[in-house]
Amino acid sequence: MLTLNQIIDQVQDLATAHAQIGSSGVGTLAEWQAKPDRTYPLLWVFHERTDVSDQYFTYRLHLLAMDRVKVGESGEDTEGHEQEVISDMQSVLLDFLAWFAQQHTQTYIVERAGSIEPFTERGNDRVAGCSYILNIKQPWDFAKCSVPESGAVIPPSVDGLTLYDFCDASVLARLTPAQVACLEAAYGTACDPVTVEINGTEVGTPASGSTFSIKVTLDGSESGSWDGTDTWEVESDPCNSLSLSASDTTPDYNASYTVTATATGFTPTSYTFSYPIDSNGCYSRTTQAGNALAITARGYGAQTVIVTATDGVTTVGATIEVNIQDTASVVAYLANIPSLSATEINAARQYAYRSFELGLTATAIYPFRGATSANTKWNLANSGNSMTWNGGWTFNSNGVTANGVNSNGDTGINGNTFGQNSIMFVLYNRTDGASGIDIIGAITPRVQFAIKWTVMVANAVYDFNNGSTANSMPTPTDVRGFWAAWRFASNALMIYHKGPGGERWGYATTASSAPASGNIKLSAGAIGVATNRNYAFFAMYSAPTSSHSVLDLEQVVNAQMTALGINVY
């Protein structure tokens, strides 16, 4: 269980690490105004309140993301900059909500419903931005911690003697002479008292001839029965509880497993499952049937499923942890390059799993990590395939760089294994202004762009703006960045590029023919002018069914380039 300070520390840790936040602070709005060193954009957090309910308590933290608005001479915002600030700050708050929702190793959960409220001209700096109430919910059963007290005693409210006081020396001392005489007259000469023990513990020494009554209770009510020999048996009713079981606690990625809830002591009328979420905030696929949830594993590592059950009166919660295992191809890739950093390992998993979740089947994914020819050759999607480096190449933390003379990277994958409209090439290029022919890249920088479906034969089977009959892509000002190209009809090619100069789409018509025979290669050193580009990523996927898959893949790839510190936009 995390304290309020620990939760706020997590908020400030993310604010410090976030690329769009200049500074952060904690306190009331008045304390924000009094802060002398306000640096914008600013993330401000203050604790509105803590709600306590049965089984849970919730911190309600008010987050404000704000920035100064550039104003014109008349005081009006310049060219809609106020709206731009509001849009940017809304994105920042969505980042915070997503980041906290992804913390699967924490005991808390985040309420995902809420409202992002815009504001303008706030405070002395007349800032604009957005606010959101982040609700952090933690299980609590009113007995998480012992009460920090020493020696507190609440005296009993019942006066007089109890059965346990009988014949206690201090009790006898309280009797009046008349009471003692009455007792002696009633019982005569006393014999030796008997010693009474329960489970080996002496509980009394009643006088001979007396009746020594001991009550046995359970939860305040008399309970139990005599076994006829030497034991009084007490059997408790079961407490209300909820237990969880998983059909597989270490499922492989994309494998199916089931979490089942079993209630004891009450009969639930409904069960609520919190579905596990992968590392990018995407839900695993699930199907609930009563007290069971069928799950198709997504993500990797430890994930927690939280379940609550209720009968309308009693509500009980429980959690269970499963550990998603890497696929065989990812395990093999990581084993082949044991020197990878944690950031590089995460990037490899993102490339492998997120493309699958986007509906793209990968034939080859070359992350080009490891800074040596022996490391960068490995295919993340197929451990049985690796690239052969021919000619002159340079290998470092930025990826692989062709020499522009005779370099080519042979994938060992024949182009004629693919159908006419069944493949998409994806490339991340870090070099602008280079000449030569890529599998997918610039023929003449900033002017033409070509797709070499196969490059082992003398001709290019499919070209874009190189024998094509039409070209609708605007001339790029910088050929660095993310490129994707695919055949989507019998005589149609589509290209998407995003880089420092923004994004653009291109379309071309081509000859209607299947790919020729020959291995697909990176750089044209084997048959033509080689490039001298720095490649950070190359992949071959099934052709996308929607442009949304391409746009989502670009975000995945560039996010990892940013994490690795080698992004170009």
Image: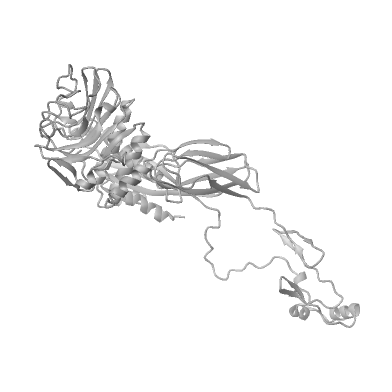
Residue drawn at (23%, 47%) of the image: 375
Say if 563 sits above or below 469 in the image. below
Q: 167 or 326, which lies in front?
A: 326
Residue drawn at (47%, 55%) of the image: 1
Residue 354 position within the rendered picture, expressed as x and y whole percent measured from the top left: 34, 37
- Left or right, 515 with reference to 99: left
**Quadrant of residue 390 in the image?**
top left
Q: Quadrant of the C terminus?
A: top left
In the picture as drawn, the residue positioned furthest to the front comes out as 517
**Quadrant of residue 475 in the image?**
top left
Residue drawn at (83%, 78%) of the image: 207
Residue 117 position within the rendered picture, expressed as x and y whole percent measured from the top left: 37, 37
On the question of residue 89 being in view, the answer is: yes
Say if 259 sits above or below 223 in the image. above
Which colour assignment does the render follow?
one colour
On the question of residue 27 being in view, the answer is: no
**Quadrant of residue 223 in the image?**
bottom right
- Left or right, 289 with reference to 503: right
Say if 499 sits above or below 204 in the image. above
Residue 311 position within the rendered picture, expressed as x and y whole percent measured from the top left: 63, 42
Q: 209 or 521, which lies in front?
A: 521
- Left or right, 177 with reference to 453: right
Residue 38 position within the rendered picture, expressed as x and y whole percent measured from the top left: 26, 49
- Left or right, 81 with reference to 310: left
